[in-house]
Amino acid sequence: MLQYGLGIGEDQNWLFSENGFQGELLGKTETIMALGNGYMGLRSSPEESYLKQTRNLFVAGTFNKFDDGEATELPNAADLTEMEIVLGGERLSLESGRVHVYQKSLNLRTGELTREFLWESPKGRKYSCRFLRFVSLDNLHMLGMRMEITPLSGECELRWTSGINGQMTNSGAQHFHEGIKRIYDKEIAQLVQTTTQSNIDFVLHAANRWELDGEPLALKPEMNIGRRKVGMSYSCTVPAASVIAVEKIASVNTSRDAEAMQGEAYSLDMLREKSLQAFRSNFGKGYAALLSDSAARWKAYWDNADITIESEEDGFDQLAVRFAQYHLLIMTPHHDSRYGIGAKGLTGEGYKGHSFWDSEIFILPYFLHTMPSIAKGLLEYRYLGLDGARLKAADNGYEGAMYPWETAFTGKEETPVWGAVNVLTGKATKIWSGFLEQHISADIAFAVVKYAQATGDEAFMDAMGAEMLIEIASFWASRVVWDESRQAYVILNIIGPDEYKEHIDNNAFSNYMAQWAIQATIELCLSYQETKPDIYRRLNETFGIEDRLDQWRKVAARLYLPSPRAGDNLIPQDDTYLTKPSIDIAPYKNSASVQGILRDYSRDQVIGMQVSKQADVVMLLYLLQNRFSNEVKAANLSYYESKTIHDSSLSMAVHSIVASGIGERETAYEFFRQASEIDLGANMKSSDAGIHSASLGGIWKCIVFGFAGIQAENGELSMTPRLPSKWKSLRFPFVWKGTRLQIELTHEQIAIEAESPSPVPIDVRIGHQVYRLEDRLTVSYSSAQGS
């Protein structure tokens, strides 16, 4: 059972816990209490072994393909956390004997995991046990563990075994060759792994130090080397009521690390030696010092990014947004722009570590308005994948760049071809997303433009952004076909955000976003022609802009955009959606598991129904909100919500933001809570395969773009706050055009403070009035005017 209110003092609303051990439901806290730093992610599996555990250690960007017929994935690296603990001849296992007290907690403020319990063994002997763990935010290669055991029923013979276990797999797929194993000075274990296909070297180290009642204890190890394993065992007698403690410090380095690829020519021997030297130095600091350095980095992060919510009710909302911000940081490879964000971050095998549109539409906005340099790195990752996108376009007979639906580090399409069972045929279902879900190219263009507008980073646009937009516009202009009957360009045979609708024509979201991307590119090129003729000349020589502009203009002007119907204001999701029969979706909408409808119907049957997996038209109303009236938004939100199962975790947040925008505060808040509870809620099976990355970005967006009502359109900042009735105040940072703002909202007023002198004047539209922000701005408004 999860508890959210156990944090007291400085830890209030920073800590959540699992009270009570559940050996059949380990996946939940393994994921939501995962540790990481953007370089690596470590599931919070128990130190002792259980059948239902999933031990995962992932390093960003280290993709490997197990077999030619399978998709590339992040390989599950050697395990560093497992400990076999034998107390008085009995192996520590909470599935035997009795557990009198159990609490597992993650402190979001410091990034430390704590697990404490009182175990009574099958023979009736009691032990107080405490385990601590962290992954360093200060040194991205380091992690630390500490175990403390107190025998309460008399002295105890302890035997402890641990090391580095390279026998890990990805659900049975072994991604590593047998590697070098070594123990240095009877103290430091080293294991080398090399991926089987991508030839990436991993070098892992681990070492231990012992204490008895706080004093150093010298124990002689029994050294062990086996197949893909290296470790050490220790034995000692622990007096009754004494505390025996072991600290285990470990490190991970790979040949993909930026520092490994710089300077002198790379060699495995060099990586082994340099990483060993670094490990020796860090091991000497000990657990407490390494944790302190890491906690200081967490403090700096929270000082910069923390959101404060004052609520009339419990502190769950406050904890939920901090939970989201914690995971957004540890899932994002902020150290290296060669890597993207996985749909499950670095917390599980789900989606194989691949990057989707989640990055640009749901996660990048958070970094854009808190740490813009990280947002820039995420867009640089897409620029580095541009050749892969060009290749996909060419392979499909199109021009420009057609971005893959799923990608790793090559920029090529990585979506698996076959998926879950078809309940009618018993065969695997073909996954069409990699072939037909193409809106991601427009989504990336959208992110590029939003980044440029929010930062004014002309250097990025000149060097990378413009090229991306030109190639994306060229793809869409070649993707459309002319429809004589409509006297318009159309987009046929596509998949929109609603993945329960395949092979459909004129998906509203895709058509509108394609047109938006082309128009944005036209405007950028004309701007270059007028203000930066040298750059325009370079781009024209490389891409033939002048030859493309006419076609772009034709497509942008005459691309079919499904418009609201007369009478009911509904925007058809596609050409046939509104003609299909409806079914009762309540059993699936209220289910604790996702995609339950595919256990009763085949995907082909679902395609023929008015049933949506997730927000589609509603997503359009959010991204291009200024193109639609509130009446249109309200009609479509109501209609499509009644057809949407929300089988995608990103869906709830989008519905919340749109509901906020039309003044439906309580509906917006309800969707926000549902989004917050996807991972952090009581469903103990919701997160087994990893965290829901897009939803976590969506939680931040619900608050900032929804409840605070911030819009950043065409370089103008505007606000229409609609705080939930349960909230008394909201305070959050927001970076805009190089200036960090602190924004505080109550139900009576808005206060905006510039924390540093702004490099450019900042105008803020509140209601119908535009205000000039200098140092501080306070604007009063009534609740009626804000609704």
Image (cartoon, grey):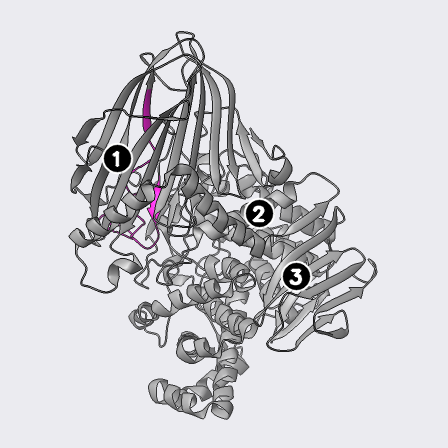
Q: Is residue 86 above or below residue 143?
A: above
Residue under numbered circle 2: 322
Tag 1 near tag 2, CB within 8 Å: no
Query: Looking at the rendering, in which quadrant would you find the N terminus?
Result: top right
Residue 494 spot, x, y in % from top left: 44, 64
Q: CA distance from mark 1 to mark 3?
A: 47 Å
Residue under numbered circle 3: 742
Nearer to us in this view, 726 or 458: 458
Residue 520 spot, x, y in % from top left: 52, 78
Task: Left or right? Give the position of 82 relative to 115.
Answer: left
Q: Secondary structure at mark 3?
A: strand
Residue under numbered circle 1: 165
Q: Is residue 58 above or below residue 530?
A: above
Q: Which quadrant would residue 41 be assigned to in this image?
A: top left
Q: Main secondary structure of the magenta part?
A: loop
Mark 3 belongs to which amino acid?
Gln
Mark 1 belongs to which amino acid?
Asn
Q: Is residue 634 above or below residue 218?
A: below
In the rendered structure, which segment of residues is drawn in magenta? Answer: 56-85
Q: Is residue 89 visible?
A: yes
Mark 2 belongs to which amino acid?
Arg
The crowding category of the residue bearing disc 3, from other C-alpha atoms within 10 Å (few below 14, some 14 to 19, many at least 20), is some
Q: What residue is rendered at 38% in x and 70% in y?
A: 383
Query: Looking at the rendering, in which quadrant would you find the C terminus?
Result: bottom right
Q: What residue is rendered at 40% in x and 62% in y?
A: 436
Q: Earlier in the sequence, mark 2 or mark 3?
A: 2
Q: How many marks?
A: 3
Q: What residue is rendered at 68% in x and 49% in y?
A: 309
